[in-house]
Every structure is written in structure tokens, then in C-alpha cells.
């Protein structure tokens, strides 16, 4: 700030002081006028009070004249009465005029008028009665007390008018005194302020010089902070003037467009950036022609996207400025594009899963009929080797179909799991000898584990099947031999990893990694390996369901699958299974064969598919059980009602036609006889017994298609050993309810 400006400021301050004094004078004059008005209103109140008192006196004078005449009968006593009556009318008119500004008083005067009128009429009636009929007639009118009542009410109204007007008078006198005092203090205070302002004006203005210097320093600091903030943005920002010359930019602008530092200087033409960032057949930025003619509304921002050769996905936004220039904002949308890709992949997998799950349901019922009948026939063909061989081949083909159907259900995440805590360090080494025998001598199998392994929460049988599937895929990828490595470890998938993989829940996981040294896969193949029926093997060499089953099993278990592969470098598939916390770890299920059990208990079989029901009843009857059957829930309840005491076990399909479903049927029967055991059978479980991919606690399920041995063991397991011993020499009779149709 210069001396000239300081002098100008001083003159301005003195001018302001003069204005303040003028304002004080004007306000003082206005207050004086207000005080004069207050005095006039006070005098107005005095007049109202006087008129009100005159009205009260006039009423009393009229009553006094009337009483004198009544007592004496002499006309001269009526002169006060006549004078008061005339004065009352005049005083009422004056009061109406004086209180025109006061609605409350006007209301009271309107209430007073009829009272005064009635009183005057009563006085006139008594006077006239005295003249015409004498004192007795006049006294009869007086003794009605009507005039006395009107007089009292009139006096009350007059007293109210006087009190209210007196209050107004007091308020106006107080206001008048207050205004006078306020004017005195205003003059004194204004003068004091003017003097103090004059004393401090010079000092304040002289301090302005130093403050202006500090302000300029703060502005420079603010500009530096703004520049730092601009550089800290994850978006690239550049400002161009109306001539399309670079004015300002941040560091991210250079990084995202991969610009040399030599280009980033004020005055660089926009066309230079267009030329530098252009790739063959695809310019990264808008051209000059697009800037001139590309937007229909010049005031609107233009947003477009570009993919760089290095895989980065950029979103570019050009925002016009009022001066004709524009701001170029560049955002790296690579992570968002990756997240959208993950979402699309998840939706695709879900749609495929729903389709395959529906198909598997019907296949399981068909395969159950085929397998059951083949096993039943095989048991009766002891002497015919050729027929036995053909039955074995048919059974193998049907079992292969059952395996494929199971893989479909695994991918669709519709298989019922029985997850438990698994000690991988204790159970996984048992698989290594099996893998060595299965893969062959040309494959070297290595096993690596980490100390302190966490227990994994998963279905043990499904985990074993998943590892075996991965090992078989690895063998096919190494036709000339190689090395298969199974590695166990603990892994923590954090929030950062979960942000890049939308389906992952952050937390602790037990990892099972299967690696091979095979031919590997291209990124295009890796993107599709988990799709059902997708395979790179020749026709007839693979179903394309192995990895799909692994994917479905891990996802249904709440885990995560990650595959790493490069052509010529091999493949690694990592299974991340949720850590089992606070649960004792168990070993993998033992697959040792057991003797096929027999029994004598009574089993109620409920199945809507006649062929499936027939083969299940035949298997149980052949094992010695007494069998009852029903086609739906209502019929099952009727059969159970006729054999309530003898039924030991209910074998029912989960999905039944009609109103009574499998779960409801079991609940009704157990409500009548809690000791009845229940086994569900289904090829496609629904939410009635499976929730979040896991069997409900206490639920027993045999999946379709089941073998003769599987059904026998499940029934034995549920009934217990005491109910499965058949009596020696006993005969088993299959009892079936007759049907009317």
C-alpha cells in the first residue's frame, strides 16, 4: 500500500465520521419529534379520562333528578335529569371520536351504549308513571331492579374504560421519558464515538501498510497450497486459454498421458498434446476440429473414454470456461473397468449355474432308475459272465452320468455340503500316495506345507475330489512328464485384495495350491476355464466340468479361487478356504469298504416318481426291510396313520407334489412319533433342508442317484445297529398299500 493510498484512506475515514455525526443529528431530531407526539397522545388520554368521568357523573345526575321527582312530584326536580340526559348523548359522541384509534375502547363503548339507553328508558318510564298513575306505579317499576342492574353494569364498563385509559396514559408518559433519556444518551454516545474514531483512525490506517504486506505473503502461501493440492489429485488436470495454449497443469496430467517434461510449459499448444498422445488409428485426445465442431452446446462439458496401449482405461472430460478456454480432466478408470468385468463374470456364472442346476434335477431321477435297476439285475446274474459284463458297462456309463450331474450341481452351488473343520496338515499327506498311483511315474509329485497351518472349514469329501480334479488336469497338461506340487499355507486376504476381487470377503483363509510345469494357458483361456463344458482337450478326452466343479465347491464353501498361468510356464490354482475358528479339526472321510448291512425295520418310502419309488422299495425289500410306499405327502400321512406303531424310518423325497412337501411331512410324522427316523433323498436340494449351501443340523440326506450300498449304509447309520439285525430264518414281506386307481 502506497502513501497516496493511506492519505486517501484517511480522508475517507474523516468523511465517514462526518456522515456519522449527520446521522446522529437526524436520529436526534426524529426522537424529538417522537417525544412531541408522545406528549400529544398523553393529552389525548387525559381528554378520554375526563369525558369518561363526565359520562359517569351525567348518569348519576339523571338518576338523582329522577329520584327527587318521584319523591316530591315537583317538576323543578326534573331539571337536573333533563340536563344530564342531554349531556349523556353529547359525551358518548365525543368518546366515540376520541377512542377511534383504540378498538378495545370502541368495543367497550358499544357494550355501554345499550346499558345507558336502557337506564334512560327506565328513568323515563318511572317519571311518566309518576305523572300518570302516581307514586305507587312508579315504585313498582323501580322495584323491578332492572334500572339498578343496568346502572351497575354501566359503572363496571366505565370503570374498565377508565382503567385501560389510565394504563395507556402511564405507558405514554413512560415512553416519553424514555425517549427523552435516549436522545440525551444518543447525543453523548455519538459524540464520544466520533472522538474515539478520530483518535483511532490514524493508528488503524497506519497499521494497514504492514497488514497488506502480510496479506500478500499469505496469498503467495495460499497459491502454493493450491498448487500442492492440485498435484495431489489422482486426476490429471490442465487449463488451456482461449487460444488453446497451456496455462496450468498438475503432475498427474503428465503421468496419465505419459508426457515428457519438456512439453509441460506455459504456452504449449493443445495440438502438440494431441499429436504426442495419438496412437495408430486411435487419437487419445480430441482433435482441433472436434474442439471447434464436436459439441452442439458449447457450454456443456464433453466426456469420452480412451484405452491406452498399456491397458489403462482413461476417462477424459473437457469443461468449457467463461473466457473461452477449457479445463481438461483425465481420470484413470482402470480399476472400475476391472470391477465391472468381475461383476459381469459373476452374473454370467450365476446364470449358467441356475441353468445347469435345473437340468441336473431331472437327470438324477432318470439315472437313479437306471442305476437301481442295473444293480438289482446284477445281483441276480451270478452265473452269466457275458450279461454281467454288459450290466457292468451299462452301470459304468450310468455312474459316469451321475458323476457329470454331480459336477453340474457343484458348479451351480446346489450340492448339499456338510462342512467341518479339516486339519489339512494331517489329512492332505494321505492323498499323496493316491495321486502318485493315479498320475503315473512320469509325474513327480511334491508336497509342501507350512508350520502352524490353520484348520479349513469345508466339506472333506468335496475337497478331496477338488484336489484330485486339479491333479488330473495338471497330468493332462504334462503329457511328456513334469512336476506337480501341492502346497499348503495360511493366507490373509485384506481389504485391498477384496477391492480388486468383488466376490472376496476379507479375512483368514487356509490355502491349498496345486501347481504344474505343463504347457500353461493363454489369458483368453484362463478367462473361461471355470465355465461348464469349456475344455481345451480333444473331443472325447474331457467334459469341461472338472474346474467348474472346483469353482462351484469353493464358492459355495465361502472361499475364493485364483488361477495363475502363462503359456509354456505352467499353471497354479490356489484354493482359499475359510479358516475354521474355535472348532476341532477332523480328518478326511474314510473310504474303507464296509459290509453291506441288512435289516428288519419298517420303512415308509415317499417318492412321486414311480420308477424311482419302485427301485428304492425293491432295494430295501431285498435288504430285508419291511417297506410301505406313497406317491405324495397326503398319501404318506394316510399310510402312516394306518401303520403308526410299526413305522421306524421315513425315506422321503424333498420335493413332493401337492400341499405337503418333504420337510413338512417329516415334521408332521415326528410330531406324532418323535422316535421315527427321517432320511431325505433328492437330486436337487431346495432351501427346506439346505441353507447357504449347507445341510441343516440333524438332517440326513442321500443324494440321487444313489447306489444300493449307499442307501443301505445311510439307512443303517440313521436307524442304528439295534434296528438292522435281521432274524435268522425270518421272511421279509413287502407290504404296499393298495391304490384305488
Image (cartoon, rainbow, N blue to C red):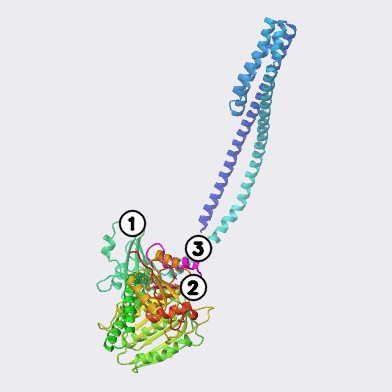
Hey, which residue is sitting farthest bottom in the picture? 441
Q: Residue at x 61, y 36 (%)?
A: 31
Q: Is residue 159 magenta?
A: no
Estimate the spatial distance between the alpha carbons at disc 2 and disc 3, rounded to whole Å.
76 Å
Query: In the image, is 589 to the left or to the right of 321?
Result: right
Which residue is identified by label 3? Answer: 216
Q: Between 517 and 353, which is closer to the camera in this rendering?
A: 353
Query: In the image, is 523 to the left or to the right of 698?
Result: left
Residue 249 x, y percent position in the rendering:
39, 68
Q: Which numbered mark, 2 or 3, is in the foreground of this view? A: 2
Picture disc at residue 404: none
Q: Earlier in the sequence, mark 2 or mark 1?
A: 1
Residue 602 seen from this side: yes
Q: Between 20 and 566, which is closer to the camera in this rendering?
A: 566
Residue 662 x, y percent position in the rendering:
42, 68
Q: Between 558 and 198, which is closer to the camera in this rendering?
A: 558
Which residue is identified by label 1? Answer: 299
Estimate the spatial distance between the alpha carbons at disc 2 and disc 1, rounded to whole Å.
65 Å
Q: Are marks 2 and 1 in contact (CB under 8 Å)?
A: no
Residue 111 x, y percent position in the rendering:
62, 23
Picture disc at residue 697: 2
Q: Quadrant of the C terminus?
A: bottom left
Say which element carries label 1: loop
Estimate the spatial distance between the alpha carbons at disc 3 and disc 1, rounded to whole Å.
34 Å
Q: Identify whether 68 is placed above or below 298.
A: above
Residue 644 x, y percent position in the rendering:
47, 68
The segment highlighted magenta reads 656-681
Query: In the image, is 424 to the left or to the right of 80?
Result: left
Q: Residue at x 48, y 70 (%)?
A: 645
Say which element carries label 2: loop
Q: Earlier in the sequence, mark 2 or mark 3?
A: 3
How many neighbours does mark 3 have within 10 angstroms: few (below 14), some (14-19), or many (20 or more)? few
Amino acid at each position: 500500500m502506497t502513501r497516496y493510498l493511506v492519505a486517501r484512506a484517511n480522508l475517507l475515514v474523516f468523511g465517514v465520521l462526518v456522515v456519522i455525526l449527520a446521522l446522529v443529528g437526524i436520529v436526534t431530531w426524529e426522537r424529538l419529534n417522537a417525544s412531541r407526539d408522545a406528549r400529544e397522545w398523553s393529552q389525548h388520554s387525559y381528554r378520554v379520562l375526563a369525558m369518561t368521568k363526565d359520562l359517569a357523573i351525567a348518569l348519576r345526575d339523571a338518576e338523582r333528578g329522577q329520584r327527587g321527582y318521584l319523591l316530591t312530584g315537583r317538576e323543578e326536580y326534573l331539571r337536573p335529569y333533563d340536563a344530564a340526559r342531554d349531556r349523556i348523548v353529547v359525551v358518548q359522541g365525543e368518546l366515540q371520536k376520541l377512542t377511534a384509534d383504540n378498538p378495545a375502547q370502541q368495543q367497550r363503548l358499544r357494550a355501554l351504549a345499550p346499558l345507558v339507553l336502557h337506564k334512560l328508558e327506565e328513568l323515563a318510564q318511572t317519571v311518566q308513571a309518576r305523572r300518570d298513575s302516581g307514586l305507587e306505579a312508579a315504585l313498582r317499576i323501580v322495584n323491578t331492579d332492572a334500572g339498578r342492574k343496568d346502572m351497575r353494569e354501566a359503572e363496571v364498563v366505565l370503570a374498565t374504560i377508565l382503567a385501560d385509559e389510565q394504563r395507556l396514559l402511564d405507558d405514554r408518559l413512560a415512553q416519553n421519558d424514555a425517549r427523552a433519556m435516549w436522545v440525551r444518551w444518543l447525543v453523548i454516545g455519538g459524540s464520544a464515538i466520533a472522538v474515539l474514531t478520530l483518535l483511532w483512525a490514524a493508528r488503524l490506517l497506519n497499521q494497514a501498510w504492514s497488514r497488506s504486506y502480510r496479506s500478500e505473503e499469505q496469498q503467495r502461501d495460499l497459491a502454493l497450497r493450491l498448487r500442492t493440492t492440485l498435484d495431489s489429485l489422482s486426476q490429471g488436470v490442465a487449463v488451456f486459454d482461449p487460444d488453446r495454449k497451456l496455462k496450468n497443469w498438475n503432475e498427474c496430467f503428465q503421468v496419465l498421458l505419459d508426457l515428457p517434461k519438456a512439453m509441460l510449459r506455459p504456452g504449449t499448444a493443445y495440438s502438440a498434446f494431441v499429436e504426442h498422445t495419438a496412437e495408430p488409428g486411435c487419437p487419445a485426445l480430441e482433435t482441433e476440429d472436434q474442439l471447434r465442431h464436436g459439441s452442439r452446446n458449447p457450454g456443456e462439458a464433453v466426456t469420452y473414454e480412451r484405452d491406452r496401449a498399456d491397458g489403462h482405461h482413461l476417462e477424459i472430460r473437457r469443461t468449457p470456461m467463461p473466457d473461452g478456454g477449457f479445463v481438461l480432466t483425465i481420470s484413470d478408470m482402470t480399476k472400475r473397468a476391472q470391477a465391472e468385468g468381475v461383476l459381469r463374470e459373476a452374473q454370467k456364472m450365476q446364470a449358467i449355474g441356475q441353468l445347469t442346476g435345473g437340468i441336473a434335477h431331472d437327470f438324477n431321477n432318470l439315472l437313479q432308475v437306471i442305476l437301481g435297476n442295473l444293480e438289482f439285475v446284477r445281483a441276480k446274474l451270478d452265473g452269466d459272465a457275458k450279461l454281467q459284463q454288459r450290466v457292468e458297462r451299462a452301470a459304468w456309463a450310468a455312474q459316469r452320468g451321475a458323476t457329470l450331474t454331480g459336477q453340474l450341481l457343484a458348479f451351480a452351488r446346489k450340492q448339499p455340503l456338510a462342512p467341518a473343520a479339516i486339519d489339512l496338515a494331517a489329512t492332505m499327506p494321505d492323498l499323496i500316495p493316491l495321486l502318485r498311483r493315479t498320475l503315473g511315474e512320469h509325474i513327480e509329485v511334491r508336497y509342501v506345507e507350512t508350520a502352524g497351518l490353520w484348520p479349513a472349514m469345508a466339506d472333506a469329501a468335496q475337497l478331496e475330489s477338488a484336489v484330485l480334479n486339479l491333479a488330473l488336469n495338471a497330468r493332462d497338461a504334462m503329457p511328456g512328464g513334469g512336476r506337480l506340487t501341492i502346497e499348503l499355507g495360511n493366507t490373509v486376504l485384506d481389504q485391498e485384495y477384496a477391492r480388486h476381487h468383488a466376490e472376496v470377503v476379507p479375512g483368514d483363509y487356509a490355502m491349498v495350491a496345486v501347481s504344474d510345469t505343463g504347457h500353461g494357458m493363454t489369458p483368453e483361456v484362463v478367462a473361461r476355464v471355470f465355465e461348464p463344458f469349456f475344455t481345451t482337450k480333444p473331443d472325447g478326452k474331457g467334459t469341461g466340468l472338472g474346474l467348474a466343479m472346483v469353482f462351484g465347491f469353493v464358492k459355495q464353501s465361502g472361499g475364493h479361487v485364483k488361477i495363475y498361468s502363462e503359456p509354456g510356464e505352467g499353471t497354479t490354482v490356489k484354493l482359499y478356504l475359510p479358516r475354521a475358528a474355535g472348532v476341532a479339526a477332523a480328518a478326511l472321510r474314510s473310504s474303507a469298504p464296509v459290509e453291506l448291512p441288512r435289516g428288519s425295520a419298517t420303512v415308509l418310502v415317499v417318492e412321486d416318481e414311480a420308477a424311482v419309488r419302485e427301485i428304492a422299495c425293491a432295494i430295501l425289500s431285498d435288504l430285508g426291510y419291511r417297506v410301505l410306499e406313497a406317491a405324495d405327502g397326503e398319501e404318506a400321512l394316510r399310510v402312516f396313520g394306518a401303520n403308526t406303531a410299526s413305522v421306524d424310518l421315513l425315506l422321503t423325497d424333498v420335493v413332493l407334489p401337492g400341499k405337503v412337501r418333504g420337510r413338512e411331512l417329516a415334521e408332521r410324522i415326528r410330531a406324532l412319533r418323535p422316535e421315527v427316523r427321517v432320511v431325505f433323498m433328492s437330486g436337487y436340494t431346495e432351501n427346506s433342508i439346505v441353507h447357504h449351501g449347507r445341510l441343516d443340523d440333524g438332517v440326513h440326506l442321500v443324494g440321487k442317484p444313489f447306489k444300493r450300498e449307499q442307501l443301505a449304509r445311510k439307512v443303517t447309520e440313521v436307524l442304528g445297529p439295534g434296528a438292522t439285525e435281521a432274524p435268522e430264518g425270518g421272511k421279509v414281506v413287502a407290504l404296499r398299500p393298495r391304490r384305488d386307481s
